[in-house]
Image: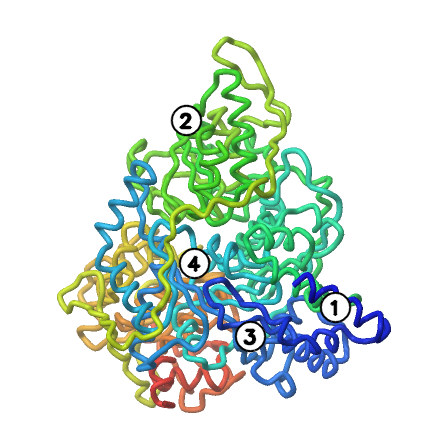
Amino acid sequence: MASYCLTVTRLRVALGTGVRRFHVSAAFNAKAKVAISRFEPGSSINYEKMHENINIVRTRLNRPLTLSEKIVYSHLDDPARQEIDRGRTYLRLHPDRVAMQDATAQMAMLQFISSGLAKVAVPSTIHCDHLIEAQIGGVEDLKRAKEVNHEVYNFLATAAAKYGVGFWKPGSGIIHQIILENYAYPGAMLIGTDSHTPNGGGLGAICIGVGGADAVDVMAGIPWELKCPKVIGVRLTGTLSGWTSPKDVILKVAGILTVKGGTGAIVEYHGPGVDSISCTGMATICNMGAEIGATTSVFPYNHRMKTYLEKTGRGEIASVADQFKDDLVPDKGCEYDQVVEINLSKLKPHINGPFTPDLAHPVSEIGAAAQRNGWPLEVKVGLIGSCTNSSYEDMGRAASLAKQALDKGLKCKAQFTVTPGSEQIRATIERDGYAKILNDVGGIVLANACGPCIGQWDRKDVKMGEKNTIVTSFNRNFTARNDANPATHAFVTSPEIVTALALAGTLNFNPETDYLTAPNGEKFKLEPPTGDELPSRDFDPGQDTYQHPPAESSSVKVDVNPMSNRLQLLEPFDKWHGKDLEDMRVLIKVKGKCTTDHISAAGPWLKFRGHLDNISNNLLIGAVNIENDAINKIRNQLTGEYGGVPDVARHYKANGVNWVVVGDENYGEGSSREHAALEPRHLGGRAIIVKSFARIHETNLKKQGLLPLTFADPDDYEKILPNDKISITCLKSFAPGKPLTAVIKHADGSQESISLNHTFNETQIEWFKAGSALNRMKELQ
């Protein structure tokens, strides 16, 4: 590569500075090709094609392009003819790869098996990170998980081998950290079956969270549809320093934009402040962009990314990216749909919560806010790690604070847990002494997995229903998410602030100004955290946890036991009968926030993610019923009795009664889990009628043949009563941009009609008619 770069330089001198970079690189096409990863030497990065497509689109649009547009539009199926209008048209795209975590991979692979295809068409991987429950410690918890989940792990491993998918075994780490370390690269487009897939934007890639049915499209080689995103620019000036960390950037942005402010948009960070943030810090910011509803987030290629690529064994990718750097940064003069400005030099440490990730507070004010609102001041547990904050730098900065406390003889007052993001991070922080410091201060190092962040936590220190506070460096803090206890007040912040608050044992502590007390009575103040961006020595890879797909897989068997309660082969959903949907019951009218955690809870339910009928027993059990303010208690309109939501849904289905769900704003925010769409479809649901949807959930509902509809007038939400019957009319003339009509039949015999909007395009309407996107795929084979 060094000789290639030298030759390119000489050629430029000979040909003159006016020669376009593309022509120079094209002259050395063979040498410029580098593998997309060390695991896939036969697949190469094609920056030349990216450059060509960018030029085609830029010429057509006749304007400068944002970085987001460059990457997205360069992956168009037909860049010369695709209609492009931000926020309106649907794009047909060819992503470079697919990544799936084990909880969502089960349903994705079951759907791929149903498609009848022999092999995946693009590089794809499965990552075992969601099914490991935190109980005792990393080694013990991993061993137990392998035993408890043997059937599922065997299914995923054999399905991966059969269909050409790479398989990362349990213990390898969290999907997003593995992607950053091995697969993301500047200019790439990746989709993943997890809402925090945007983590890869820290390496200049467009990485988008999707449902399993979308993953099947890409794995099948079918163009993937995405509504052309708007672009929100976040201009960073100044420099991060002291207690302020990259996490504070996204905590601040979440406070500004709220949980739905990024819906339908890519958040693109730019400006002189970018260079003060490490590559893994940029990944942290992109990761938590999911909490503002953004399609994804991305940073421009710079020297921090180059250094990270080199340190993770991908120096060749960095060298070629340097040659195409103009394509990996925004054009000068490009325009954003909205601009947010943040001065990093003035940004203060933040902590967000409880119960929602956009309730932002400066750390200096959280104690007073807690006292004012009656939130528990005592910090019961501090938890650092997760896919958002588990880098080498994160662990080093937390360890620097722990070391200061240990030097004074002080340990954490709160319980303290540490989740390494990957086996490579675990091995390296052990080698470099960080793990010992964090353990000595009172920390328990958990498995390289999601753990408490997604509710995989066998918590014992408080009783269910007991009011308490935890602080985490996670990304999401919805009610009951981490420990299934709705009384737990969870706050998200940086690993540094978590560590400081765990040492103090209270929210009423500002590490910038307040003092801790050592066991000998000495008062001392913590110095601002420090930590190396990357290890001075190479990373220690730890144990080899990757399974390559075999070259020949015809003999590989993928067995699903018909008697299993963990796995279940899928049956096709029924097709639309060609008529209006008449007299549907209102299963539940949901009050307030309804995330995918409310619709399909995680935690102990994760073990049923491969069994649609069993996982459907958690349908909407976390949603609040507007009729009685109760959770999982609704009236069965056929019997007059109250029951659980899934039980009533099953009763309606058994009696041939279709039903709808009525909801509020940003319905389905949070995780990408498509089970929140599969379950209502499986139990007889036909439509979800709300004020507004989160992007991924709306798409997932369409994919499964449901009708996600929004009130043309949000006030019409008030017109629907829990005992009403709903008819959806005009379906025979169902067309893009044409509203549908709902006829509301009240129990007193009166009725009224309201208008319902939708975002279906022609292709998606065919999914509805066929019964699902997968059914439609089979029709076209």
Q: Secondary structure at mark 3?
A: strand
Question: With respect to residue 774, does 701 lie above or below?
Answer: above
User: Extreme left residue here?
Assistant: 563
Residue highlighted by disc 3: 227
Q: Secondary structure at mark 2?
A: loop
How far across and down, in percent of the image, does residue 703 sit?
40, 76
Q: Is residue 243 left or right of residue 94?
A: right
Precedes in sequence: disc 1 or disc 4:
1
How far across and down, in percent of the image, does residue 456 sit?
33, 46
Structural distance between the alpha carbons of marks 3 and 1? 42 Å
Structural distance between the alpha carbons of marks 2 and 3? 48 Å
Q: Which mark is residue 7?
A: 1
Judge depth for marks 4 and 2 and give the one in front.
2
Q: Nearer the viewer, residue 749 or 278?
A: 278
Q: Nearer the viewer, residue 693 or 26?
A: 26
Query: Which quarter of the picture shows residue 120?
Result: bottom left
Precedes in sequence: disc 2 or disc 3:
3
Query: Which quarter of the picture shows residue 233?
Result: bottom right
